[in-house]
Amino acid sequence: MNSILIKNGRIIDPSQDLDLQGNLLIEDGKIKGLCKETTNADEVIDATGLIVSPGLIDLHVSLCEPGFEEDETIESGTAAALAGGITSLACLPNTSPVVDDRSSAEFILLQAERAANCNVFPLGAVTKNHEGKELAEIGQLVAGKAVGFTDADHPIENAEIMRCALEYTRMFHHPILNRPQVPELTEKGQMHEGYYSTVLGLKGIPAAAESIMVNRDIALAELTQGRIHLMCISTRESVSQIRRAKQAGIQVTADVTPHHLALTDQMLENYDPHYKVLPPLRPQEHIDALIEGLKDGTIDAICSDHTPHATEKKTDEILGAAFGIIGLETLIPVCFQSLIKPGHLTWSELISKLTSGPANILGLNKGTLAEGADADITLINPDTKYKLNAADLKSASHNSPFLGKELQGRAEIVLVSGQIRYRAKS
Amino acid sequence: MNIDHEYRTDISKGWTRKHILGLQDLTKDELNIILNQAAEFKRLAAIGETKLTPLAGTVVANLFFEPSTRTRISFGLAAKRLSADTVDFSASGSSLSKGESFVDTAKTVEAMGVSYVVVRHKTPGAPQLLAQHLDANILNAGDGTHEHPTQALLDIFTIREHFGKIEGLTVTLVGDILHSRVARSNIWGLKKLGAHVIVCGPTTLIPSEISRMGVEVSHNLDDVLNRTDCLNLLRIQFERQRGHFFPSIREYAHLFGMNKQRINKAKENVLILAPGPINRGVEITPDVADGPHSVILGQVSNGLIIRMACLYLLHLQRTASLGNPG
């Protein structure tokens, strides 16, 4: 029997309402439970000054393999996840070919197993080749271990297709993840429509482009009794619609990214494509509403929406630049900067959005330190300050607006199934 | 002859800016330096000094990634009047379609010994990008729907020439404000020089946040005519009508076209500008375009001296930064 003792850490597990100074014992890759500091174990990890959290879970990440290996591979992406404190992630099916059949999902699992970094859960396509026309083989994808269904960066445009998808997935008990953006109002848009888009001469994307589809998806979830998860919510109106829907008992969940909490549309002032992302960065009033949504439970999870792009796709003129920001390795510090430091959330509240929140959405038996659970554990150093350098990133791409910035907080030690898979450089 | 030494050098005193990317960045003093330098070149031209030599031995590259006739010719001639050698690069559409990035294309041209790069591009911010990557001085000749500083400077120069000042005037920009780089540059420049600016056009073509730039918004031309000193009639692009921003050209002309009836309602000495190329019968009727209030062709000749002034000032900055006066 192999055992590890994590001693003298601040153990935070929102799934059990736990926030205490203590010691945690792991046996044979599973959580054994709280114990005394003097408990015998094969290995002891000193967690003094560290937060002991259930391993973080990232709801949707682009791993880009197969098809876009110049941006990221399953190996590099999962290594980046570990360095960011993430022990489980769900990967988007927006690869080439699209993950719209069982063999594609199984290829991802095989590559993840070879990489032996974090746990990977494939998301399957809702429609064949993300074309929005015919349903993908959802039942076959479930057999290939897909945990949810999404057309990734393609919003499901056709309401009838969305209706059928919500009805059809009901029998598999998996959610549909949609990125709400009405295409007619988003076409050629580069950034949030407002003062800065006016001054910069960049075509804007109005906030209404999102809330119109949020409204539709909620109505369809009510009609079908299906489960809808709204990805990357970014506007005030979306938050209030979701809040009302939850109050009415409709099965809707939502996530937000750290960069939509930390950055505003003003940051595009110098036309830096690193701030070009979908949905676009919004003004402060929307950020305030998102934070309210996190506080009152309207928004269930925080997700990196890691979107890697090779340098050449992100450094030329802004109209030609790709949308997206990498986020795995900045998840903890950017959440710290925008939520913990200003006092919006406690560590326990934040960790629930990064563990039990996403686990519940995808129905994963993860995100807890309860006895018998897989020993996926992230030890967070909340105090360490450092400058983010491209050379330190494990991700194959470096498209982060936080490069060169002073950050605080990071994953110190990461365990997956009781094995230490990552240790930060001291 | 070299005007560096033989003509007034006090005008350009205080100019230290390396690039002219937009009028949003420029101070009131810098705007006045450009206008005054242009006036000096105009004075010289009037006494027959049309070929000057300050840029002799330097190379100006005109990089036009978007079709242009008037601006390209004007910049080419401005460089030649200052005795620079010129290289021209024109590409319709993006150079990316040829497999080379915009920055790489510009770097390749710069490597041929270019000191000054005039750039037009469909992408807003493209001149800023070159300023970050190139050593050359960059002059924006229009970037997407962002700015077109030399066009606004020549508009402002023309207004100043006519009224003797900018401060206290009311200037109304008419038409498609949403898609107009000329409008944005005019707003920044005119506001800094103390004018009151009205933007007037259909609600679909005036972005709602434009008032934060310090302008008055109107959707009724007839309402603002009697307090407008200068009308700048922006070109209406026909594809906008197909893009359902307004129902028909006829309706646009009815609501916002400048015609004889409207001239009669306007101030007696109203000045009519149009950046062109003009659509006769749409934003302006032929009798108005060719009438006594119009200075449309005067704008074109002022464009040449404004571009000379801009190139000359960038040259002064460059020689000063190289520690090599003249």
Image (cartoon, rainbow, N blue to C red):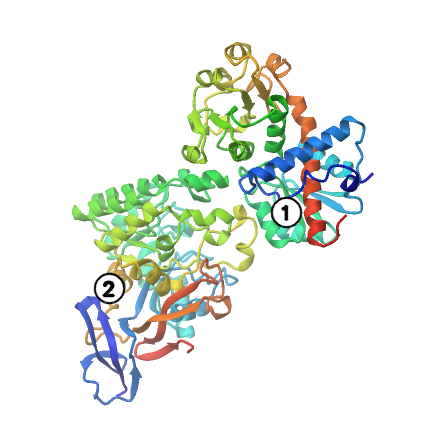
Q: Position of residue B231 (x, y in %)?
A: 54, 21
Q: Mark 2 points at which residue?
A: A356
Near-viewer residue (A215 or B104): B104
Q: Which numbered tag is attached to residue A115?
A: none
Query: Mark 1 falls within which chain?
Result: B
Amino acid type at circle 1 is: Thr
> Which secondary structure lies at badge 2?
helix
Pointer 2 local density, CA inside 10 Å: few below 14, some 14–19, many at least 20: many
Q: Residue at x 47, y 70 (%)?
A: A392
Residue B42 pos. (x, y %) = 72, 29
Expressed as whole percent of the image width and height from the top left, the position of residue A204 reads 44, 40
Residue B193: quadrant of the picture: top right
Residue A368, placed above or below residue B170: below
Direction from residue B186 to residue A358 in the image, left or right: left
Q: Which of the two residues, A320 or A159, is positioned nearer the viewer here?
A: A320
Q: Which of B131 and A399 is in front in this view?
A: B131
Task: Tell me the residue at 48%/47% (across/down).
Answer: A269
Q: Name the residue under label 1.
A: B16
Q: Is residue B238 above or below residue A307?
A: above
Judge by depth and name the residue closer to the eye, B169 or A304.
Answer: B169
